[in-house]
Image (spheres, rainbow, N blue to C red):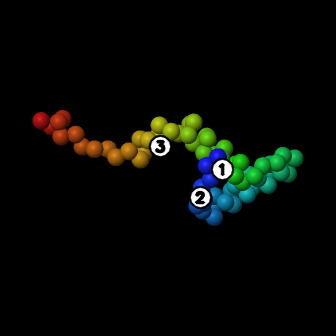
Amino acid sequence: MFKKQINIGIEQKTDLDAIQRQIIENGGKVTLMDLINDAISIFINEYKNKAILKYTPQFYDKKEDE
């Protein structure tokens, strides 16, 4: 498994803590790392193409003007 430190904001940490707390109150067991790994999997499976479009530069094509 690849291990990497990640930076998350206070609001993100608070929201993850709330999800974890609710799961525990419901009788479940989960770590924050489990939740983060699930979030990454969901992002990759559901938003991969949107992320590629969002972060890929849109270059001006000179050939269209010629």
The C terminus is located in which quarter?
top left
| Residue to which mark 1 is pinned | 36
Disc 1 and disc 2: Cα gap in Å?
10 Å
Residue drawn at 73 percent across, 57 percent down: 17
Q: Is residue 27 above or below residue 46?
A: below
Left or right of 61, for residue 19: right
| 65 vs 6, nearest the viewer | 6
Residue 27: x %, y % from top left: 87, 47
Q: Amino acid at mark 3?
A: Ala
Residue 18 in the image: state x and y as whole percent.
Answer: 74, 56
Name the residue type under label 2: Ile
Q: Residue furthest left?
A: 66
Judging by the rendered image, the residue that carries numbered circle 2 is 6
The disc, 3 or 1, on the residue closer to the chain's N-terminal end is: 1
Give the class, few, some or many, for how many residues have Cα within 10 Å of label 1's Cα (few <14, many ≥20).
few
Position of residue 4 relative to residue 49, above or below, is below
Mark 1 residue element: helix
Task: Please tell me whether residue 48 is drawn above or below residue 55 in the rendered image.
Answer: above
Q: Are marks 1 and 2 in contact (CB under 8 Å)?
A: yes
Q: Do labels 3 and 1 touch, CB within 8 Å? A: no
- Outermost residue on the bottom side: it is 10
Residue 45 horizontal side relative to residue 15, left or right: left
* Label 3, label 1: how far apart the Cα atoms are: 18 Å
Disc 3 target residue: 51
Image position, residue 50 (x, y; %)? 47, 40
- How many neighbours does mark 3 have within 10 angstroms: few (below 14), some (14-19), or many (20 or more)? few
The kind of residue tagged 1 is: Ile
Residue at 63% across / 64% down in the picture?
A: 10
SS for callout 2: loop
Mark 2 residue crowding within 10 angstroms, few (<14) / some (14–19) / many (20+):
few
